[in-house]
Image (spheres, rainbow, N blue to C red):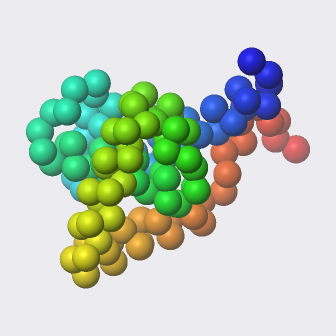
């Protein structure tokens, strides 16, 4: 693997971690629960789906890149994105996701492999 690909994977992972942290905070769940390899309860699964969706939307990452960053299959991310997109018909939920997306979009990019100047 070339170093550019590795750096991109690390950056995707950092963005996914940031999104998981933000979603865990916003939805009142434990962050480590979102990393679980099993579904867990409905609340945890939904928060994980929101995190995958926001990572895809806010950072404009492909479903495959989001899947790799979350340790999931691309089809799992696609399902999550469709499900969350359908939920955006509810105004309050849509506004909340807009706010979370804005936070993610305004966060500076990670400084993976770069030294401070």
Which quadrant: the C terminus?
top right
In the image, farthest residue toward the right: 117
Q: Image height check: is 97 above or below 52?
A: below
User: Within the image, what quadrant is residue 34 found in?
Assistant: top left
Using residue 75 as the reference point, say whether residue 39 is left or right of it: left
Q: Image height check: is 112 above or below 93?
A: above
In the image, farthest residue toward the top: 1
Quick one: 43 or 1, which is closer to the camera? 1
Using residue 110 as the reference point, say whether residue 113 is left or right of it: right
Can residue 11 be seen in the rendering of this structure? yes
Q: How far across and how far down the image is residue 71, in percent?
A: 42, 28
Can residue 23 be seen in the rendering of this structure? no
User: Within the image, what quadrant is residue 96 found in?
Assistant: bottom left
Which quadrant: the N terminus?
top right
Q: Residue at x 67, y 51 (%)?
A: 109
Q: Residue at x 79, y 31 (%)?
A: 4
Quick one: 27 or 92, which is closer to the camera? 92
Q: How far across and how far down the image is residue 44, in percent?
A: 20, 43
Q: How far across and how far down the image is residue 6, in percent?
A: 71, 26
User: Within the image, what quadrant is residue 75 found in?
Assistant: top left
């Amino acid at each position: 693997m070339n170093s550019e690909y590795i750096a991109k994977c690390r950056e995707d992972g950092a963005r996914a971690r940031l999104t998981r942290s933000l979603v865990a905070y916003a939805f009142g769940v434990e962050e480590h629960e979102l990393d679980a390899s099993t579904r867990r309860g409905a609340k945890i699964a939904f928060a994980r789906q929101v995190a995958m969706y926001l990572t895809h939307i806010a950072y404009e990452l492909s479903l495959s890149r989001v899947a790799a960053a979350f340790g999931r299959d691309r089809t799992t991310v696609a399902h999550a994105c469709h499900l969350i997109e359908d939920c955006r018909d509810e105004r309050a939920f849509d506004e909340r996701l807009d706010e979370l997306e804005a936070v993610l979009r305004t966060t500076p990019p990670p400084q993976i492999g770069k030294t401070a100047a």
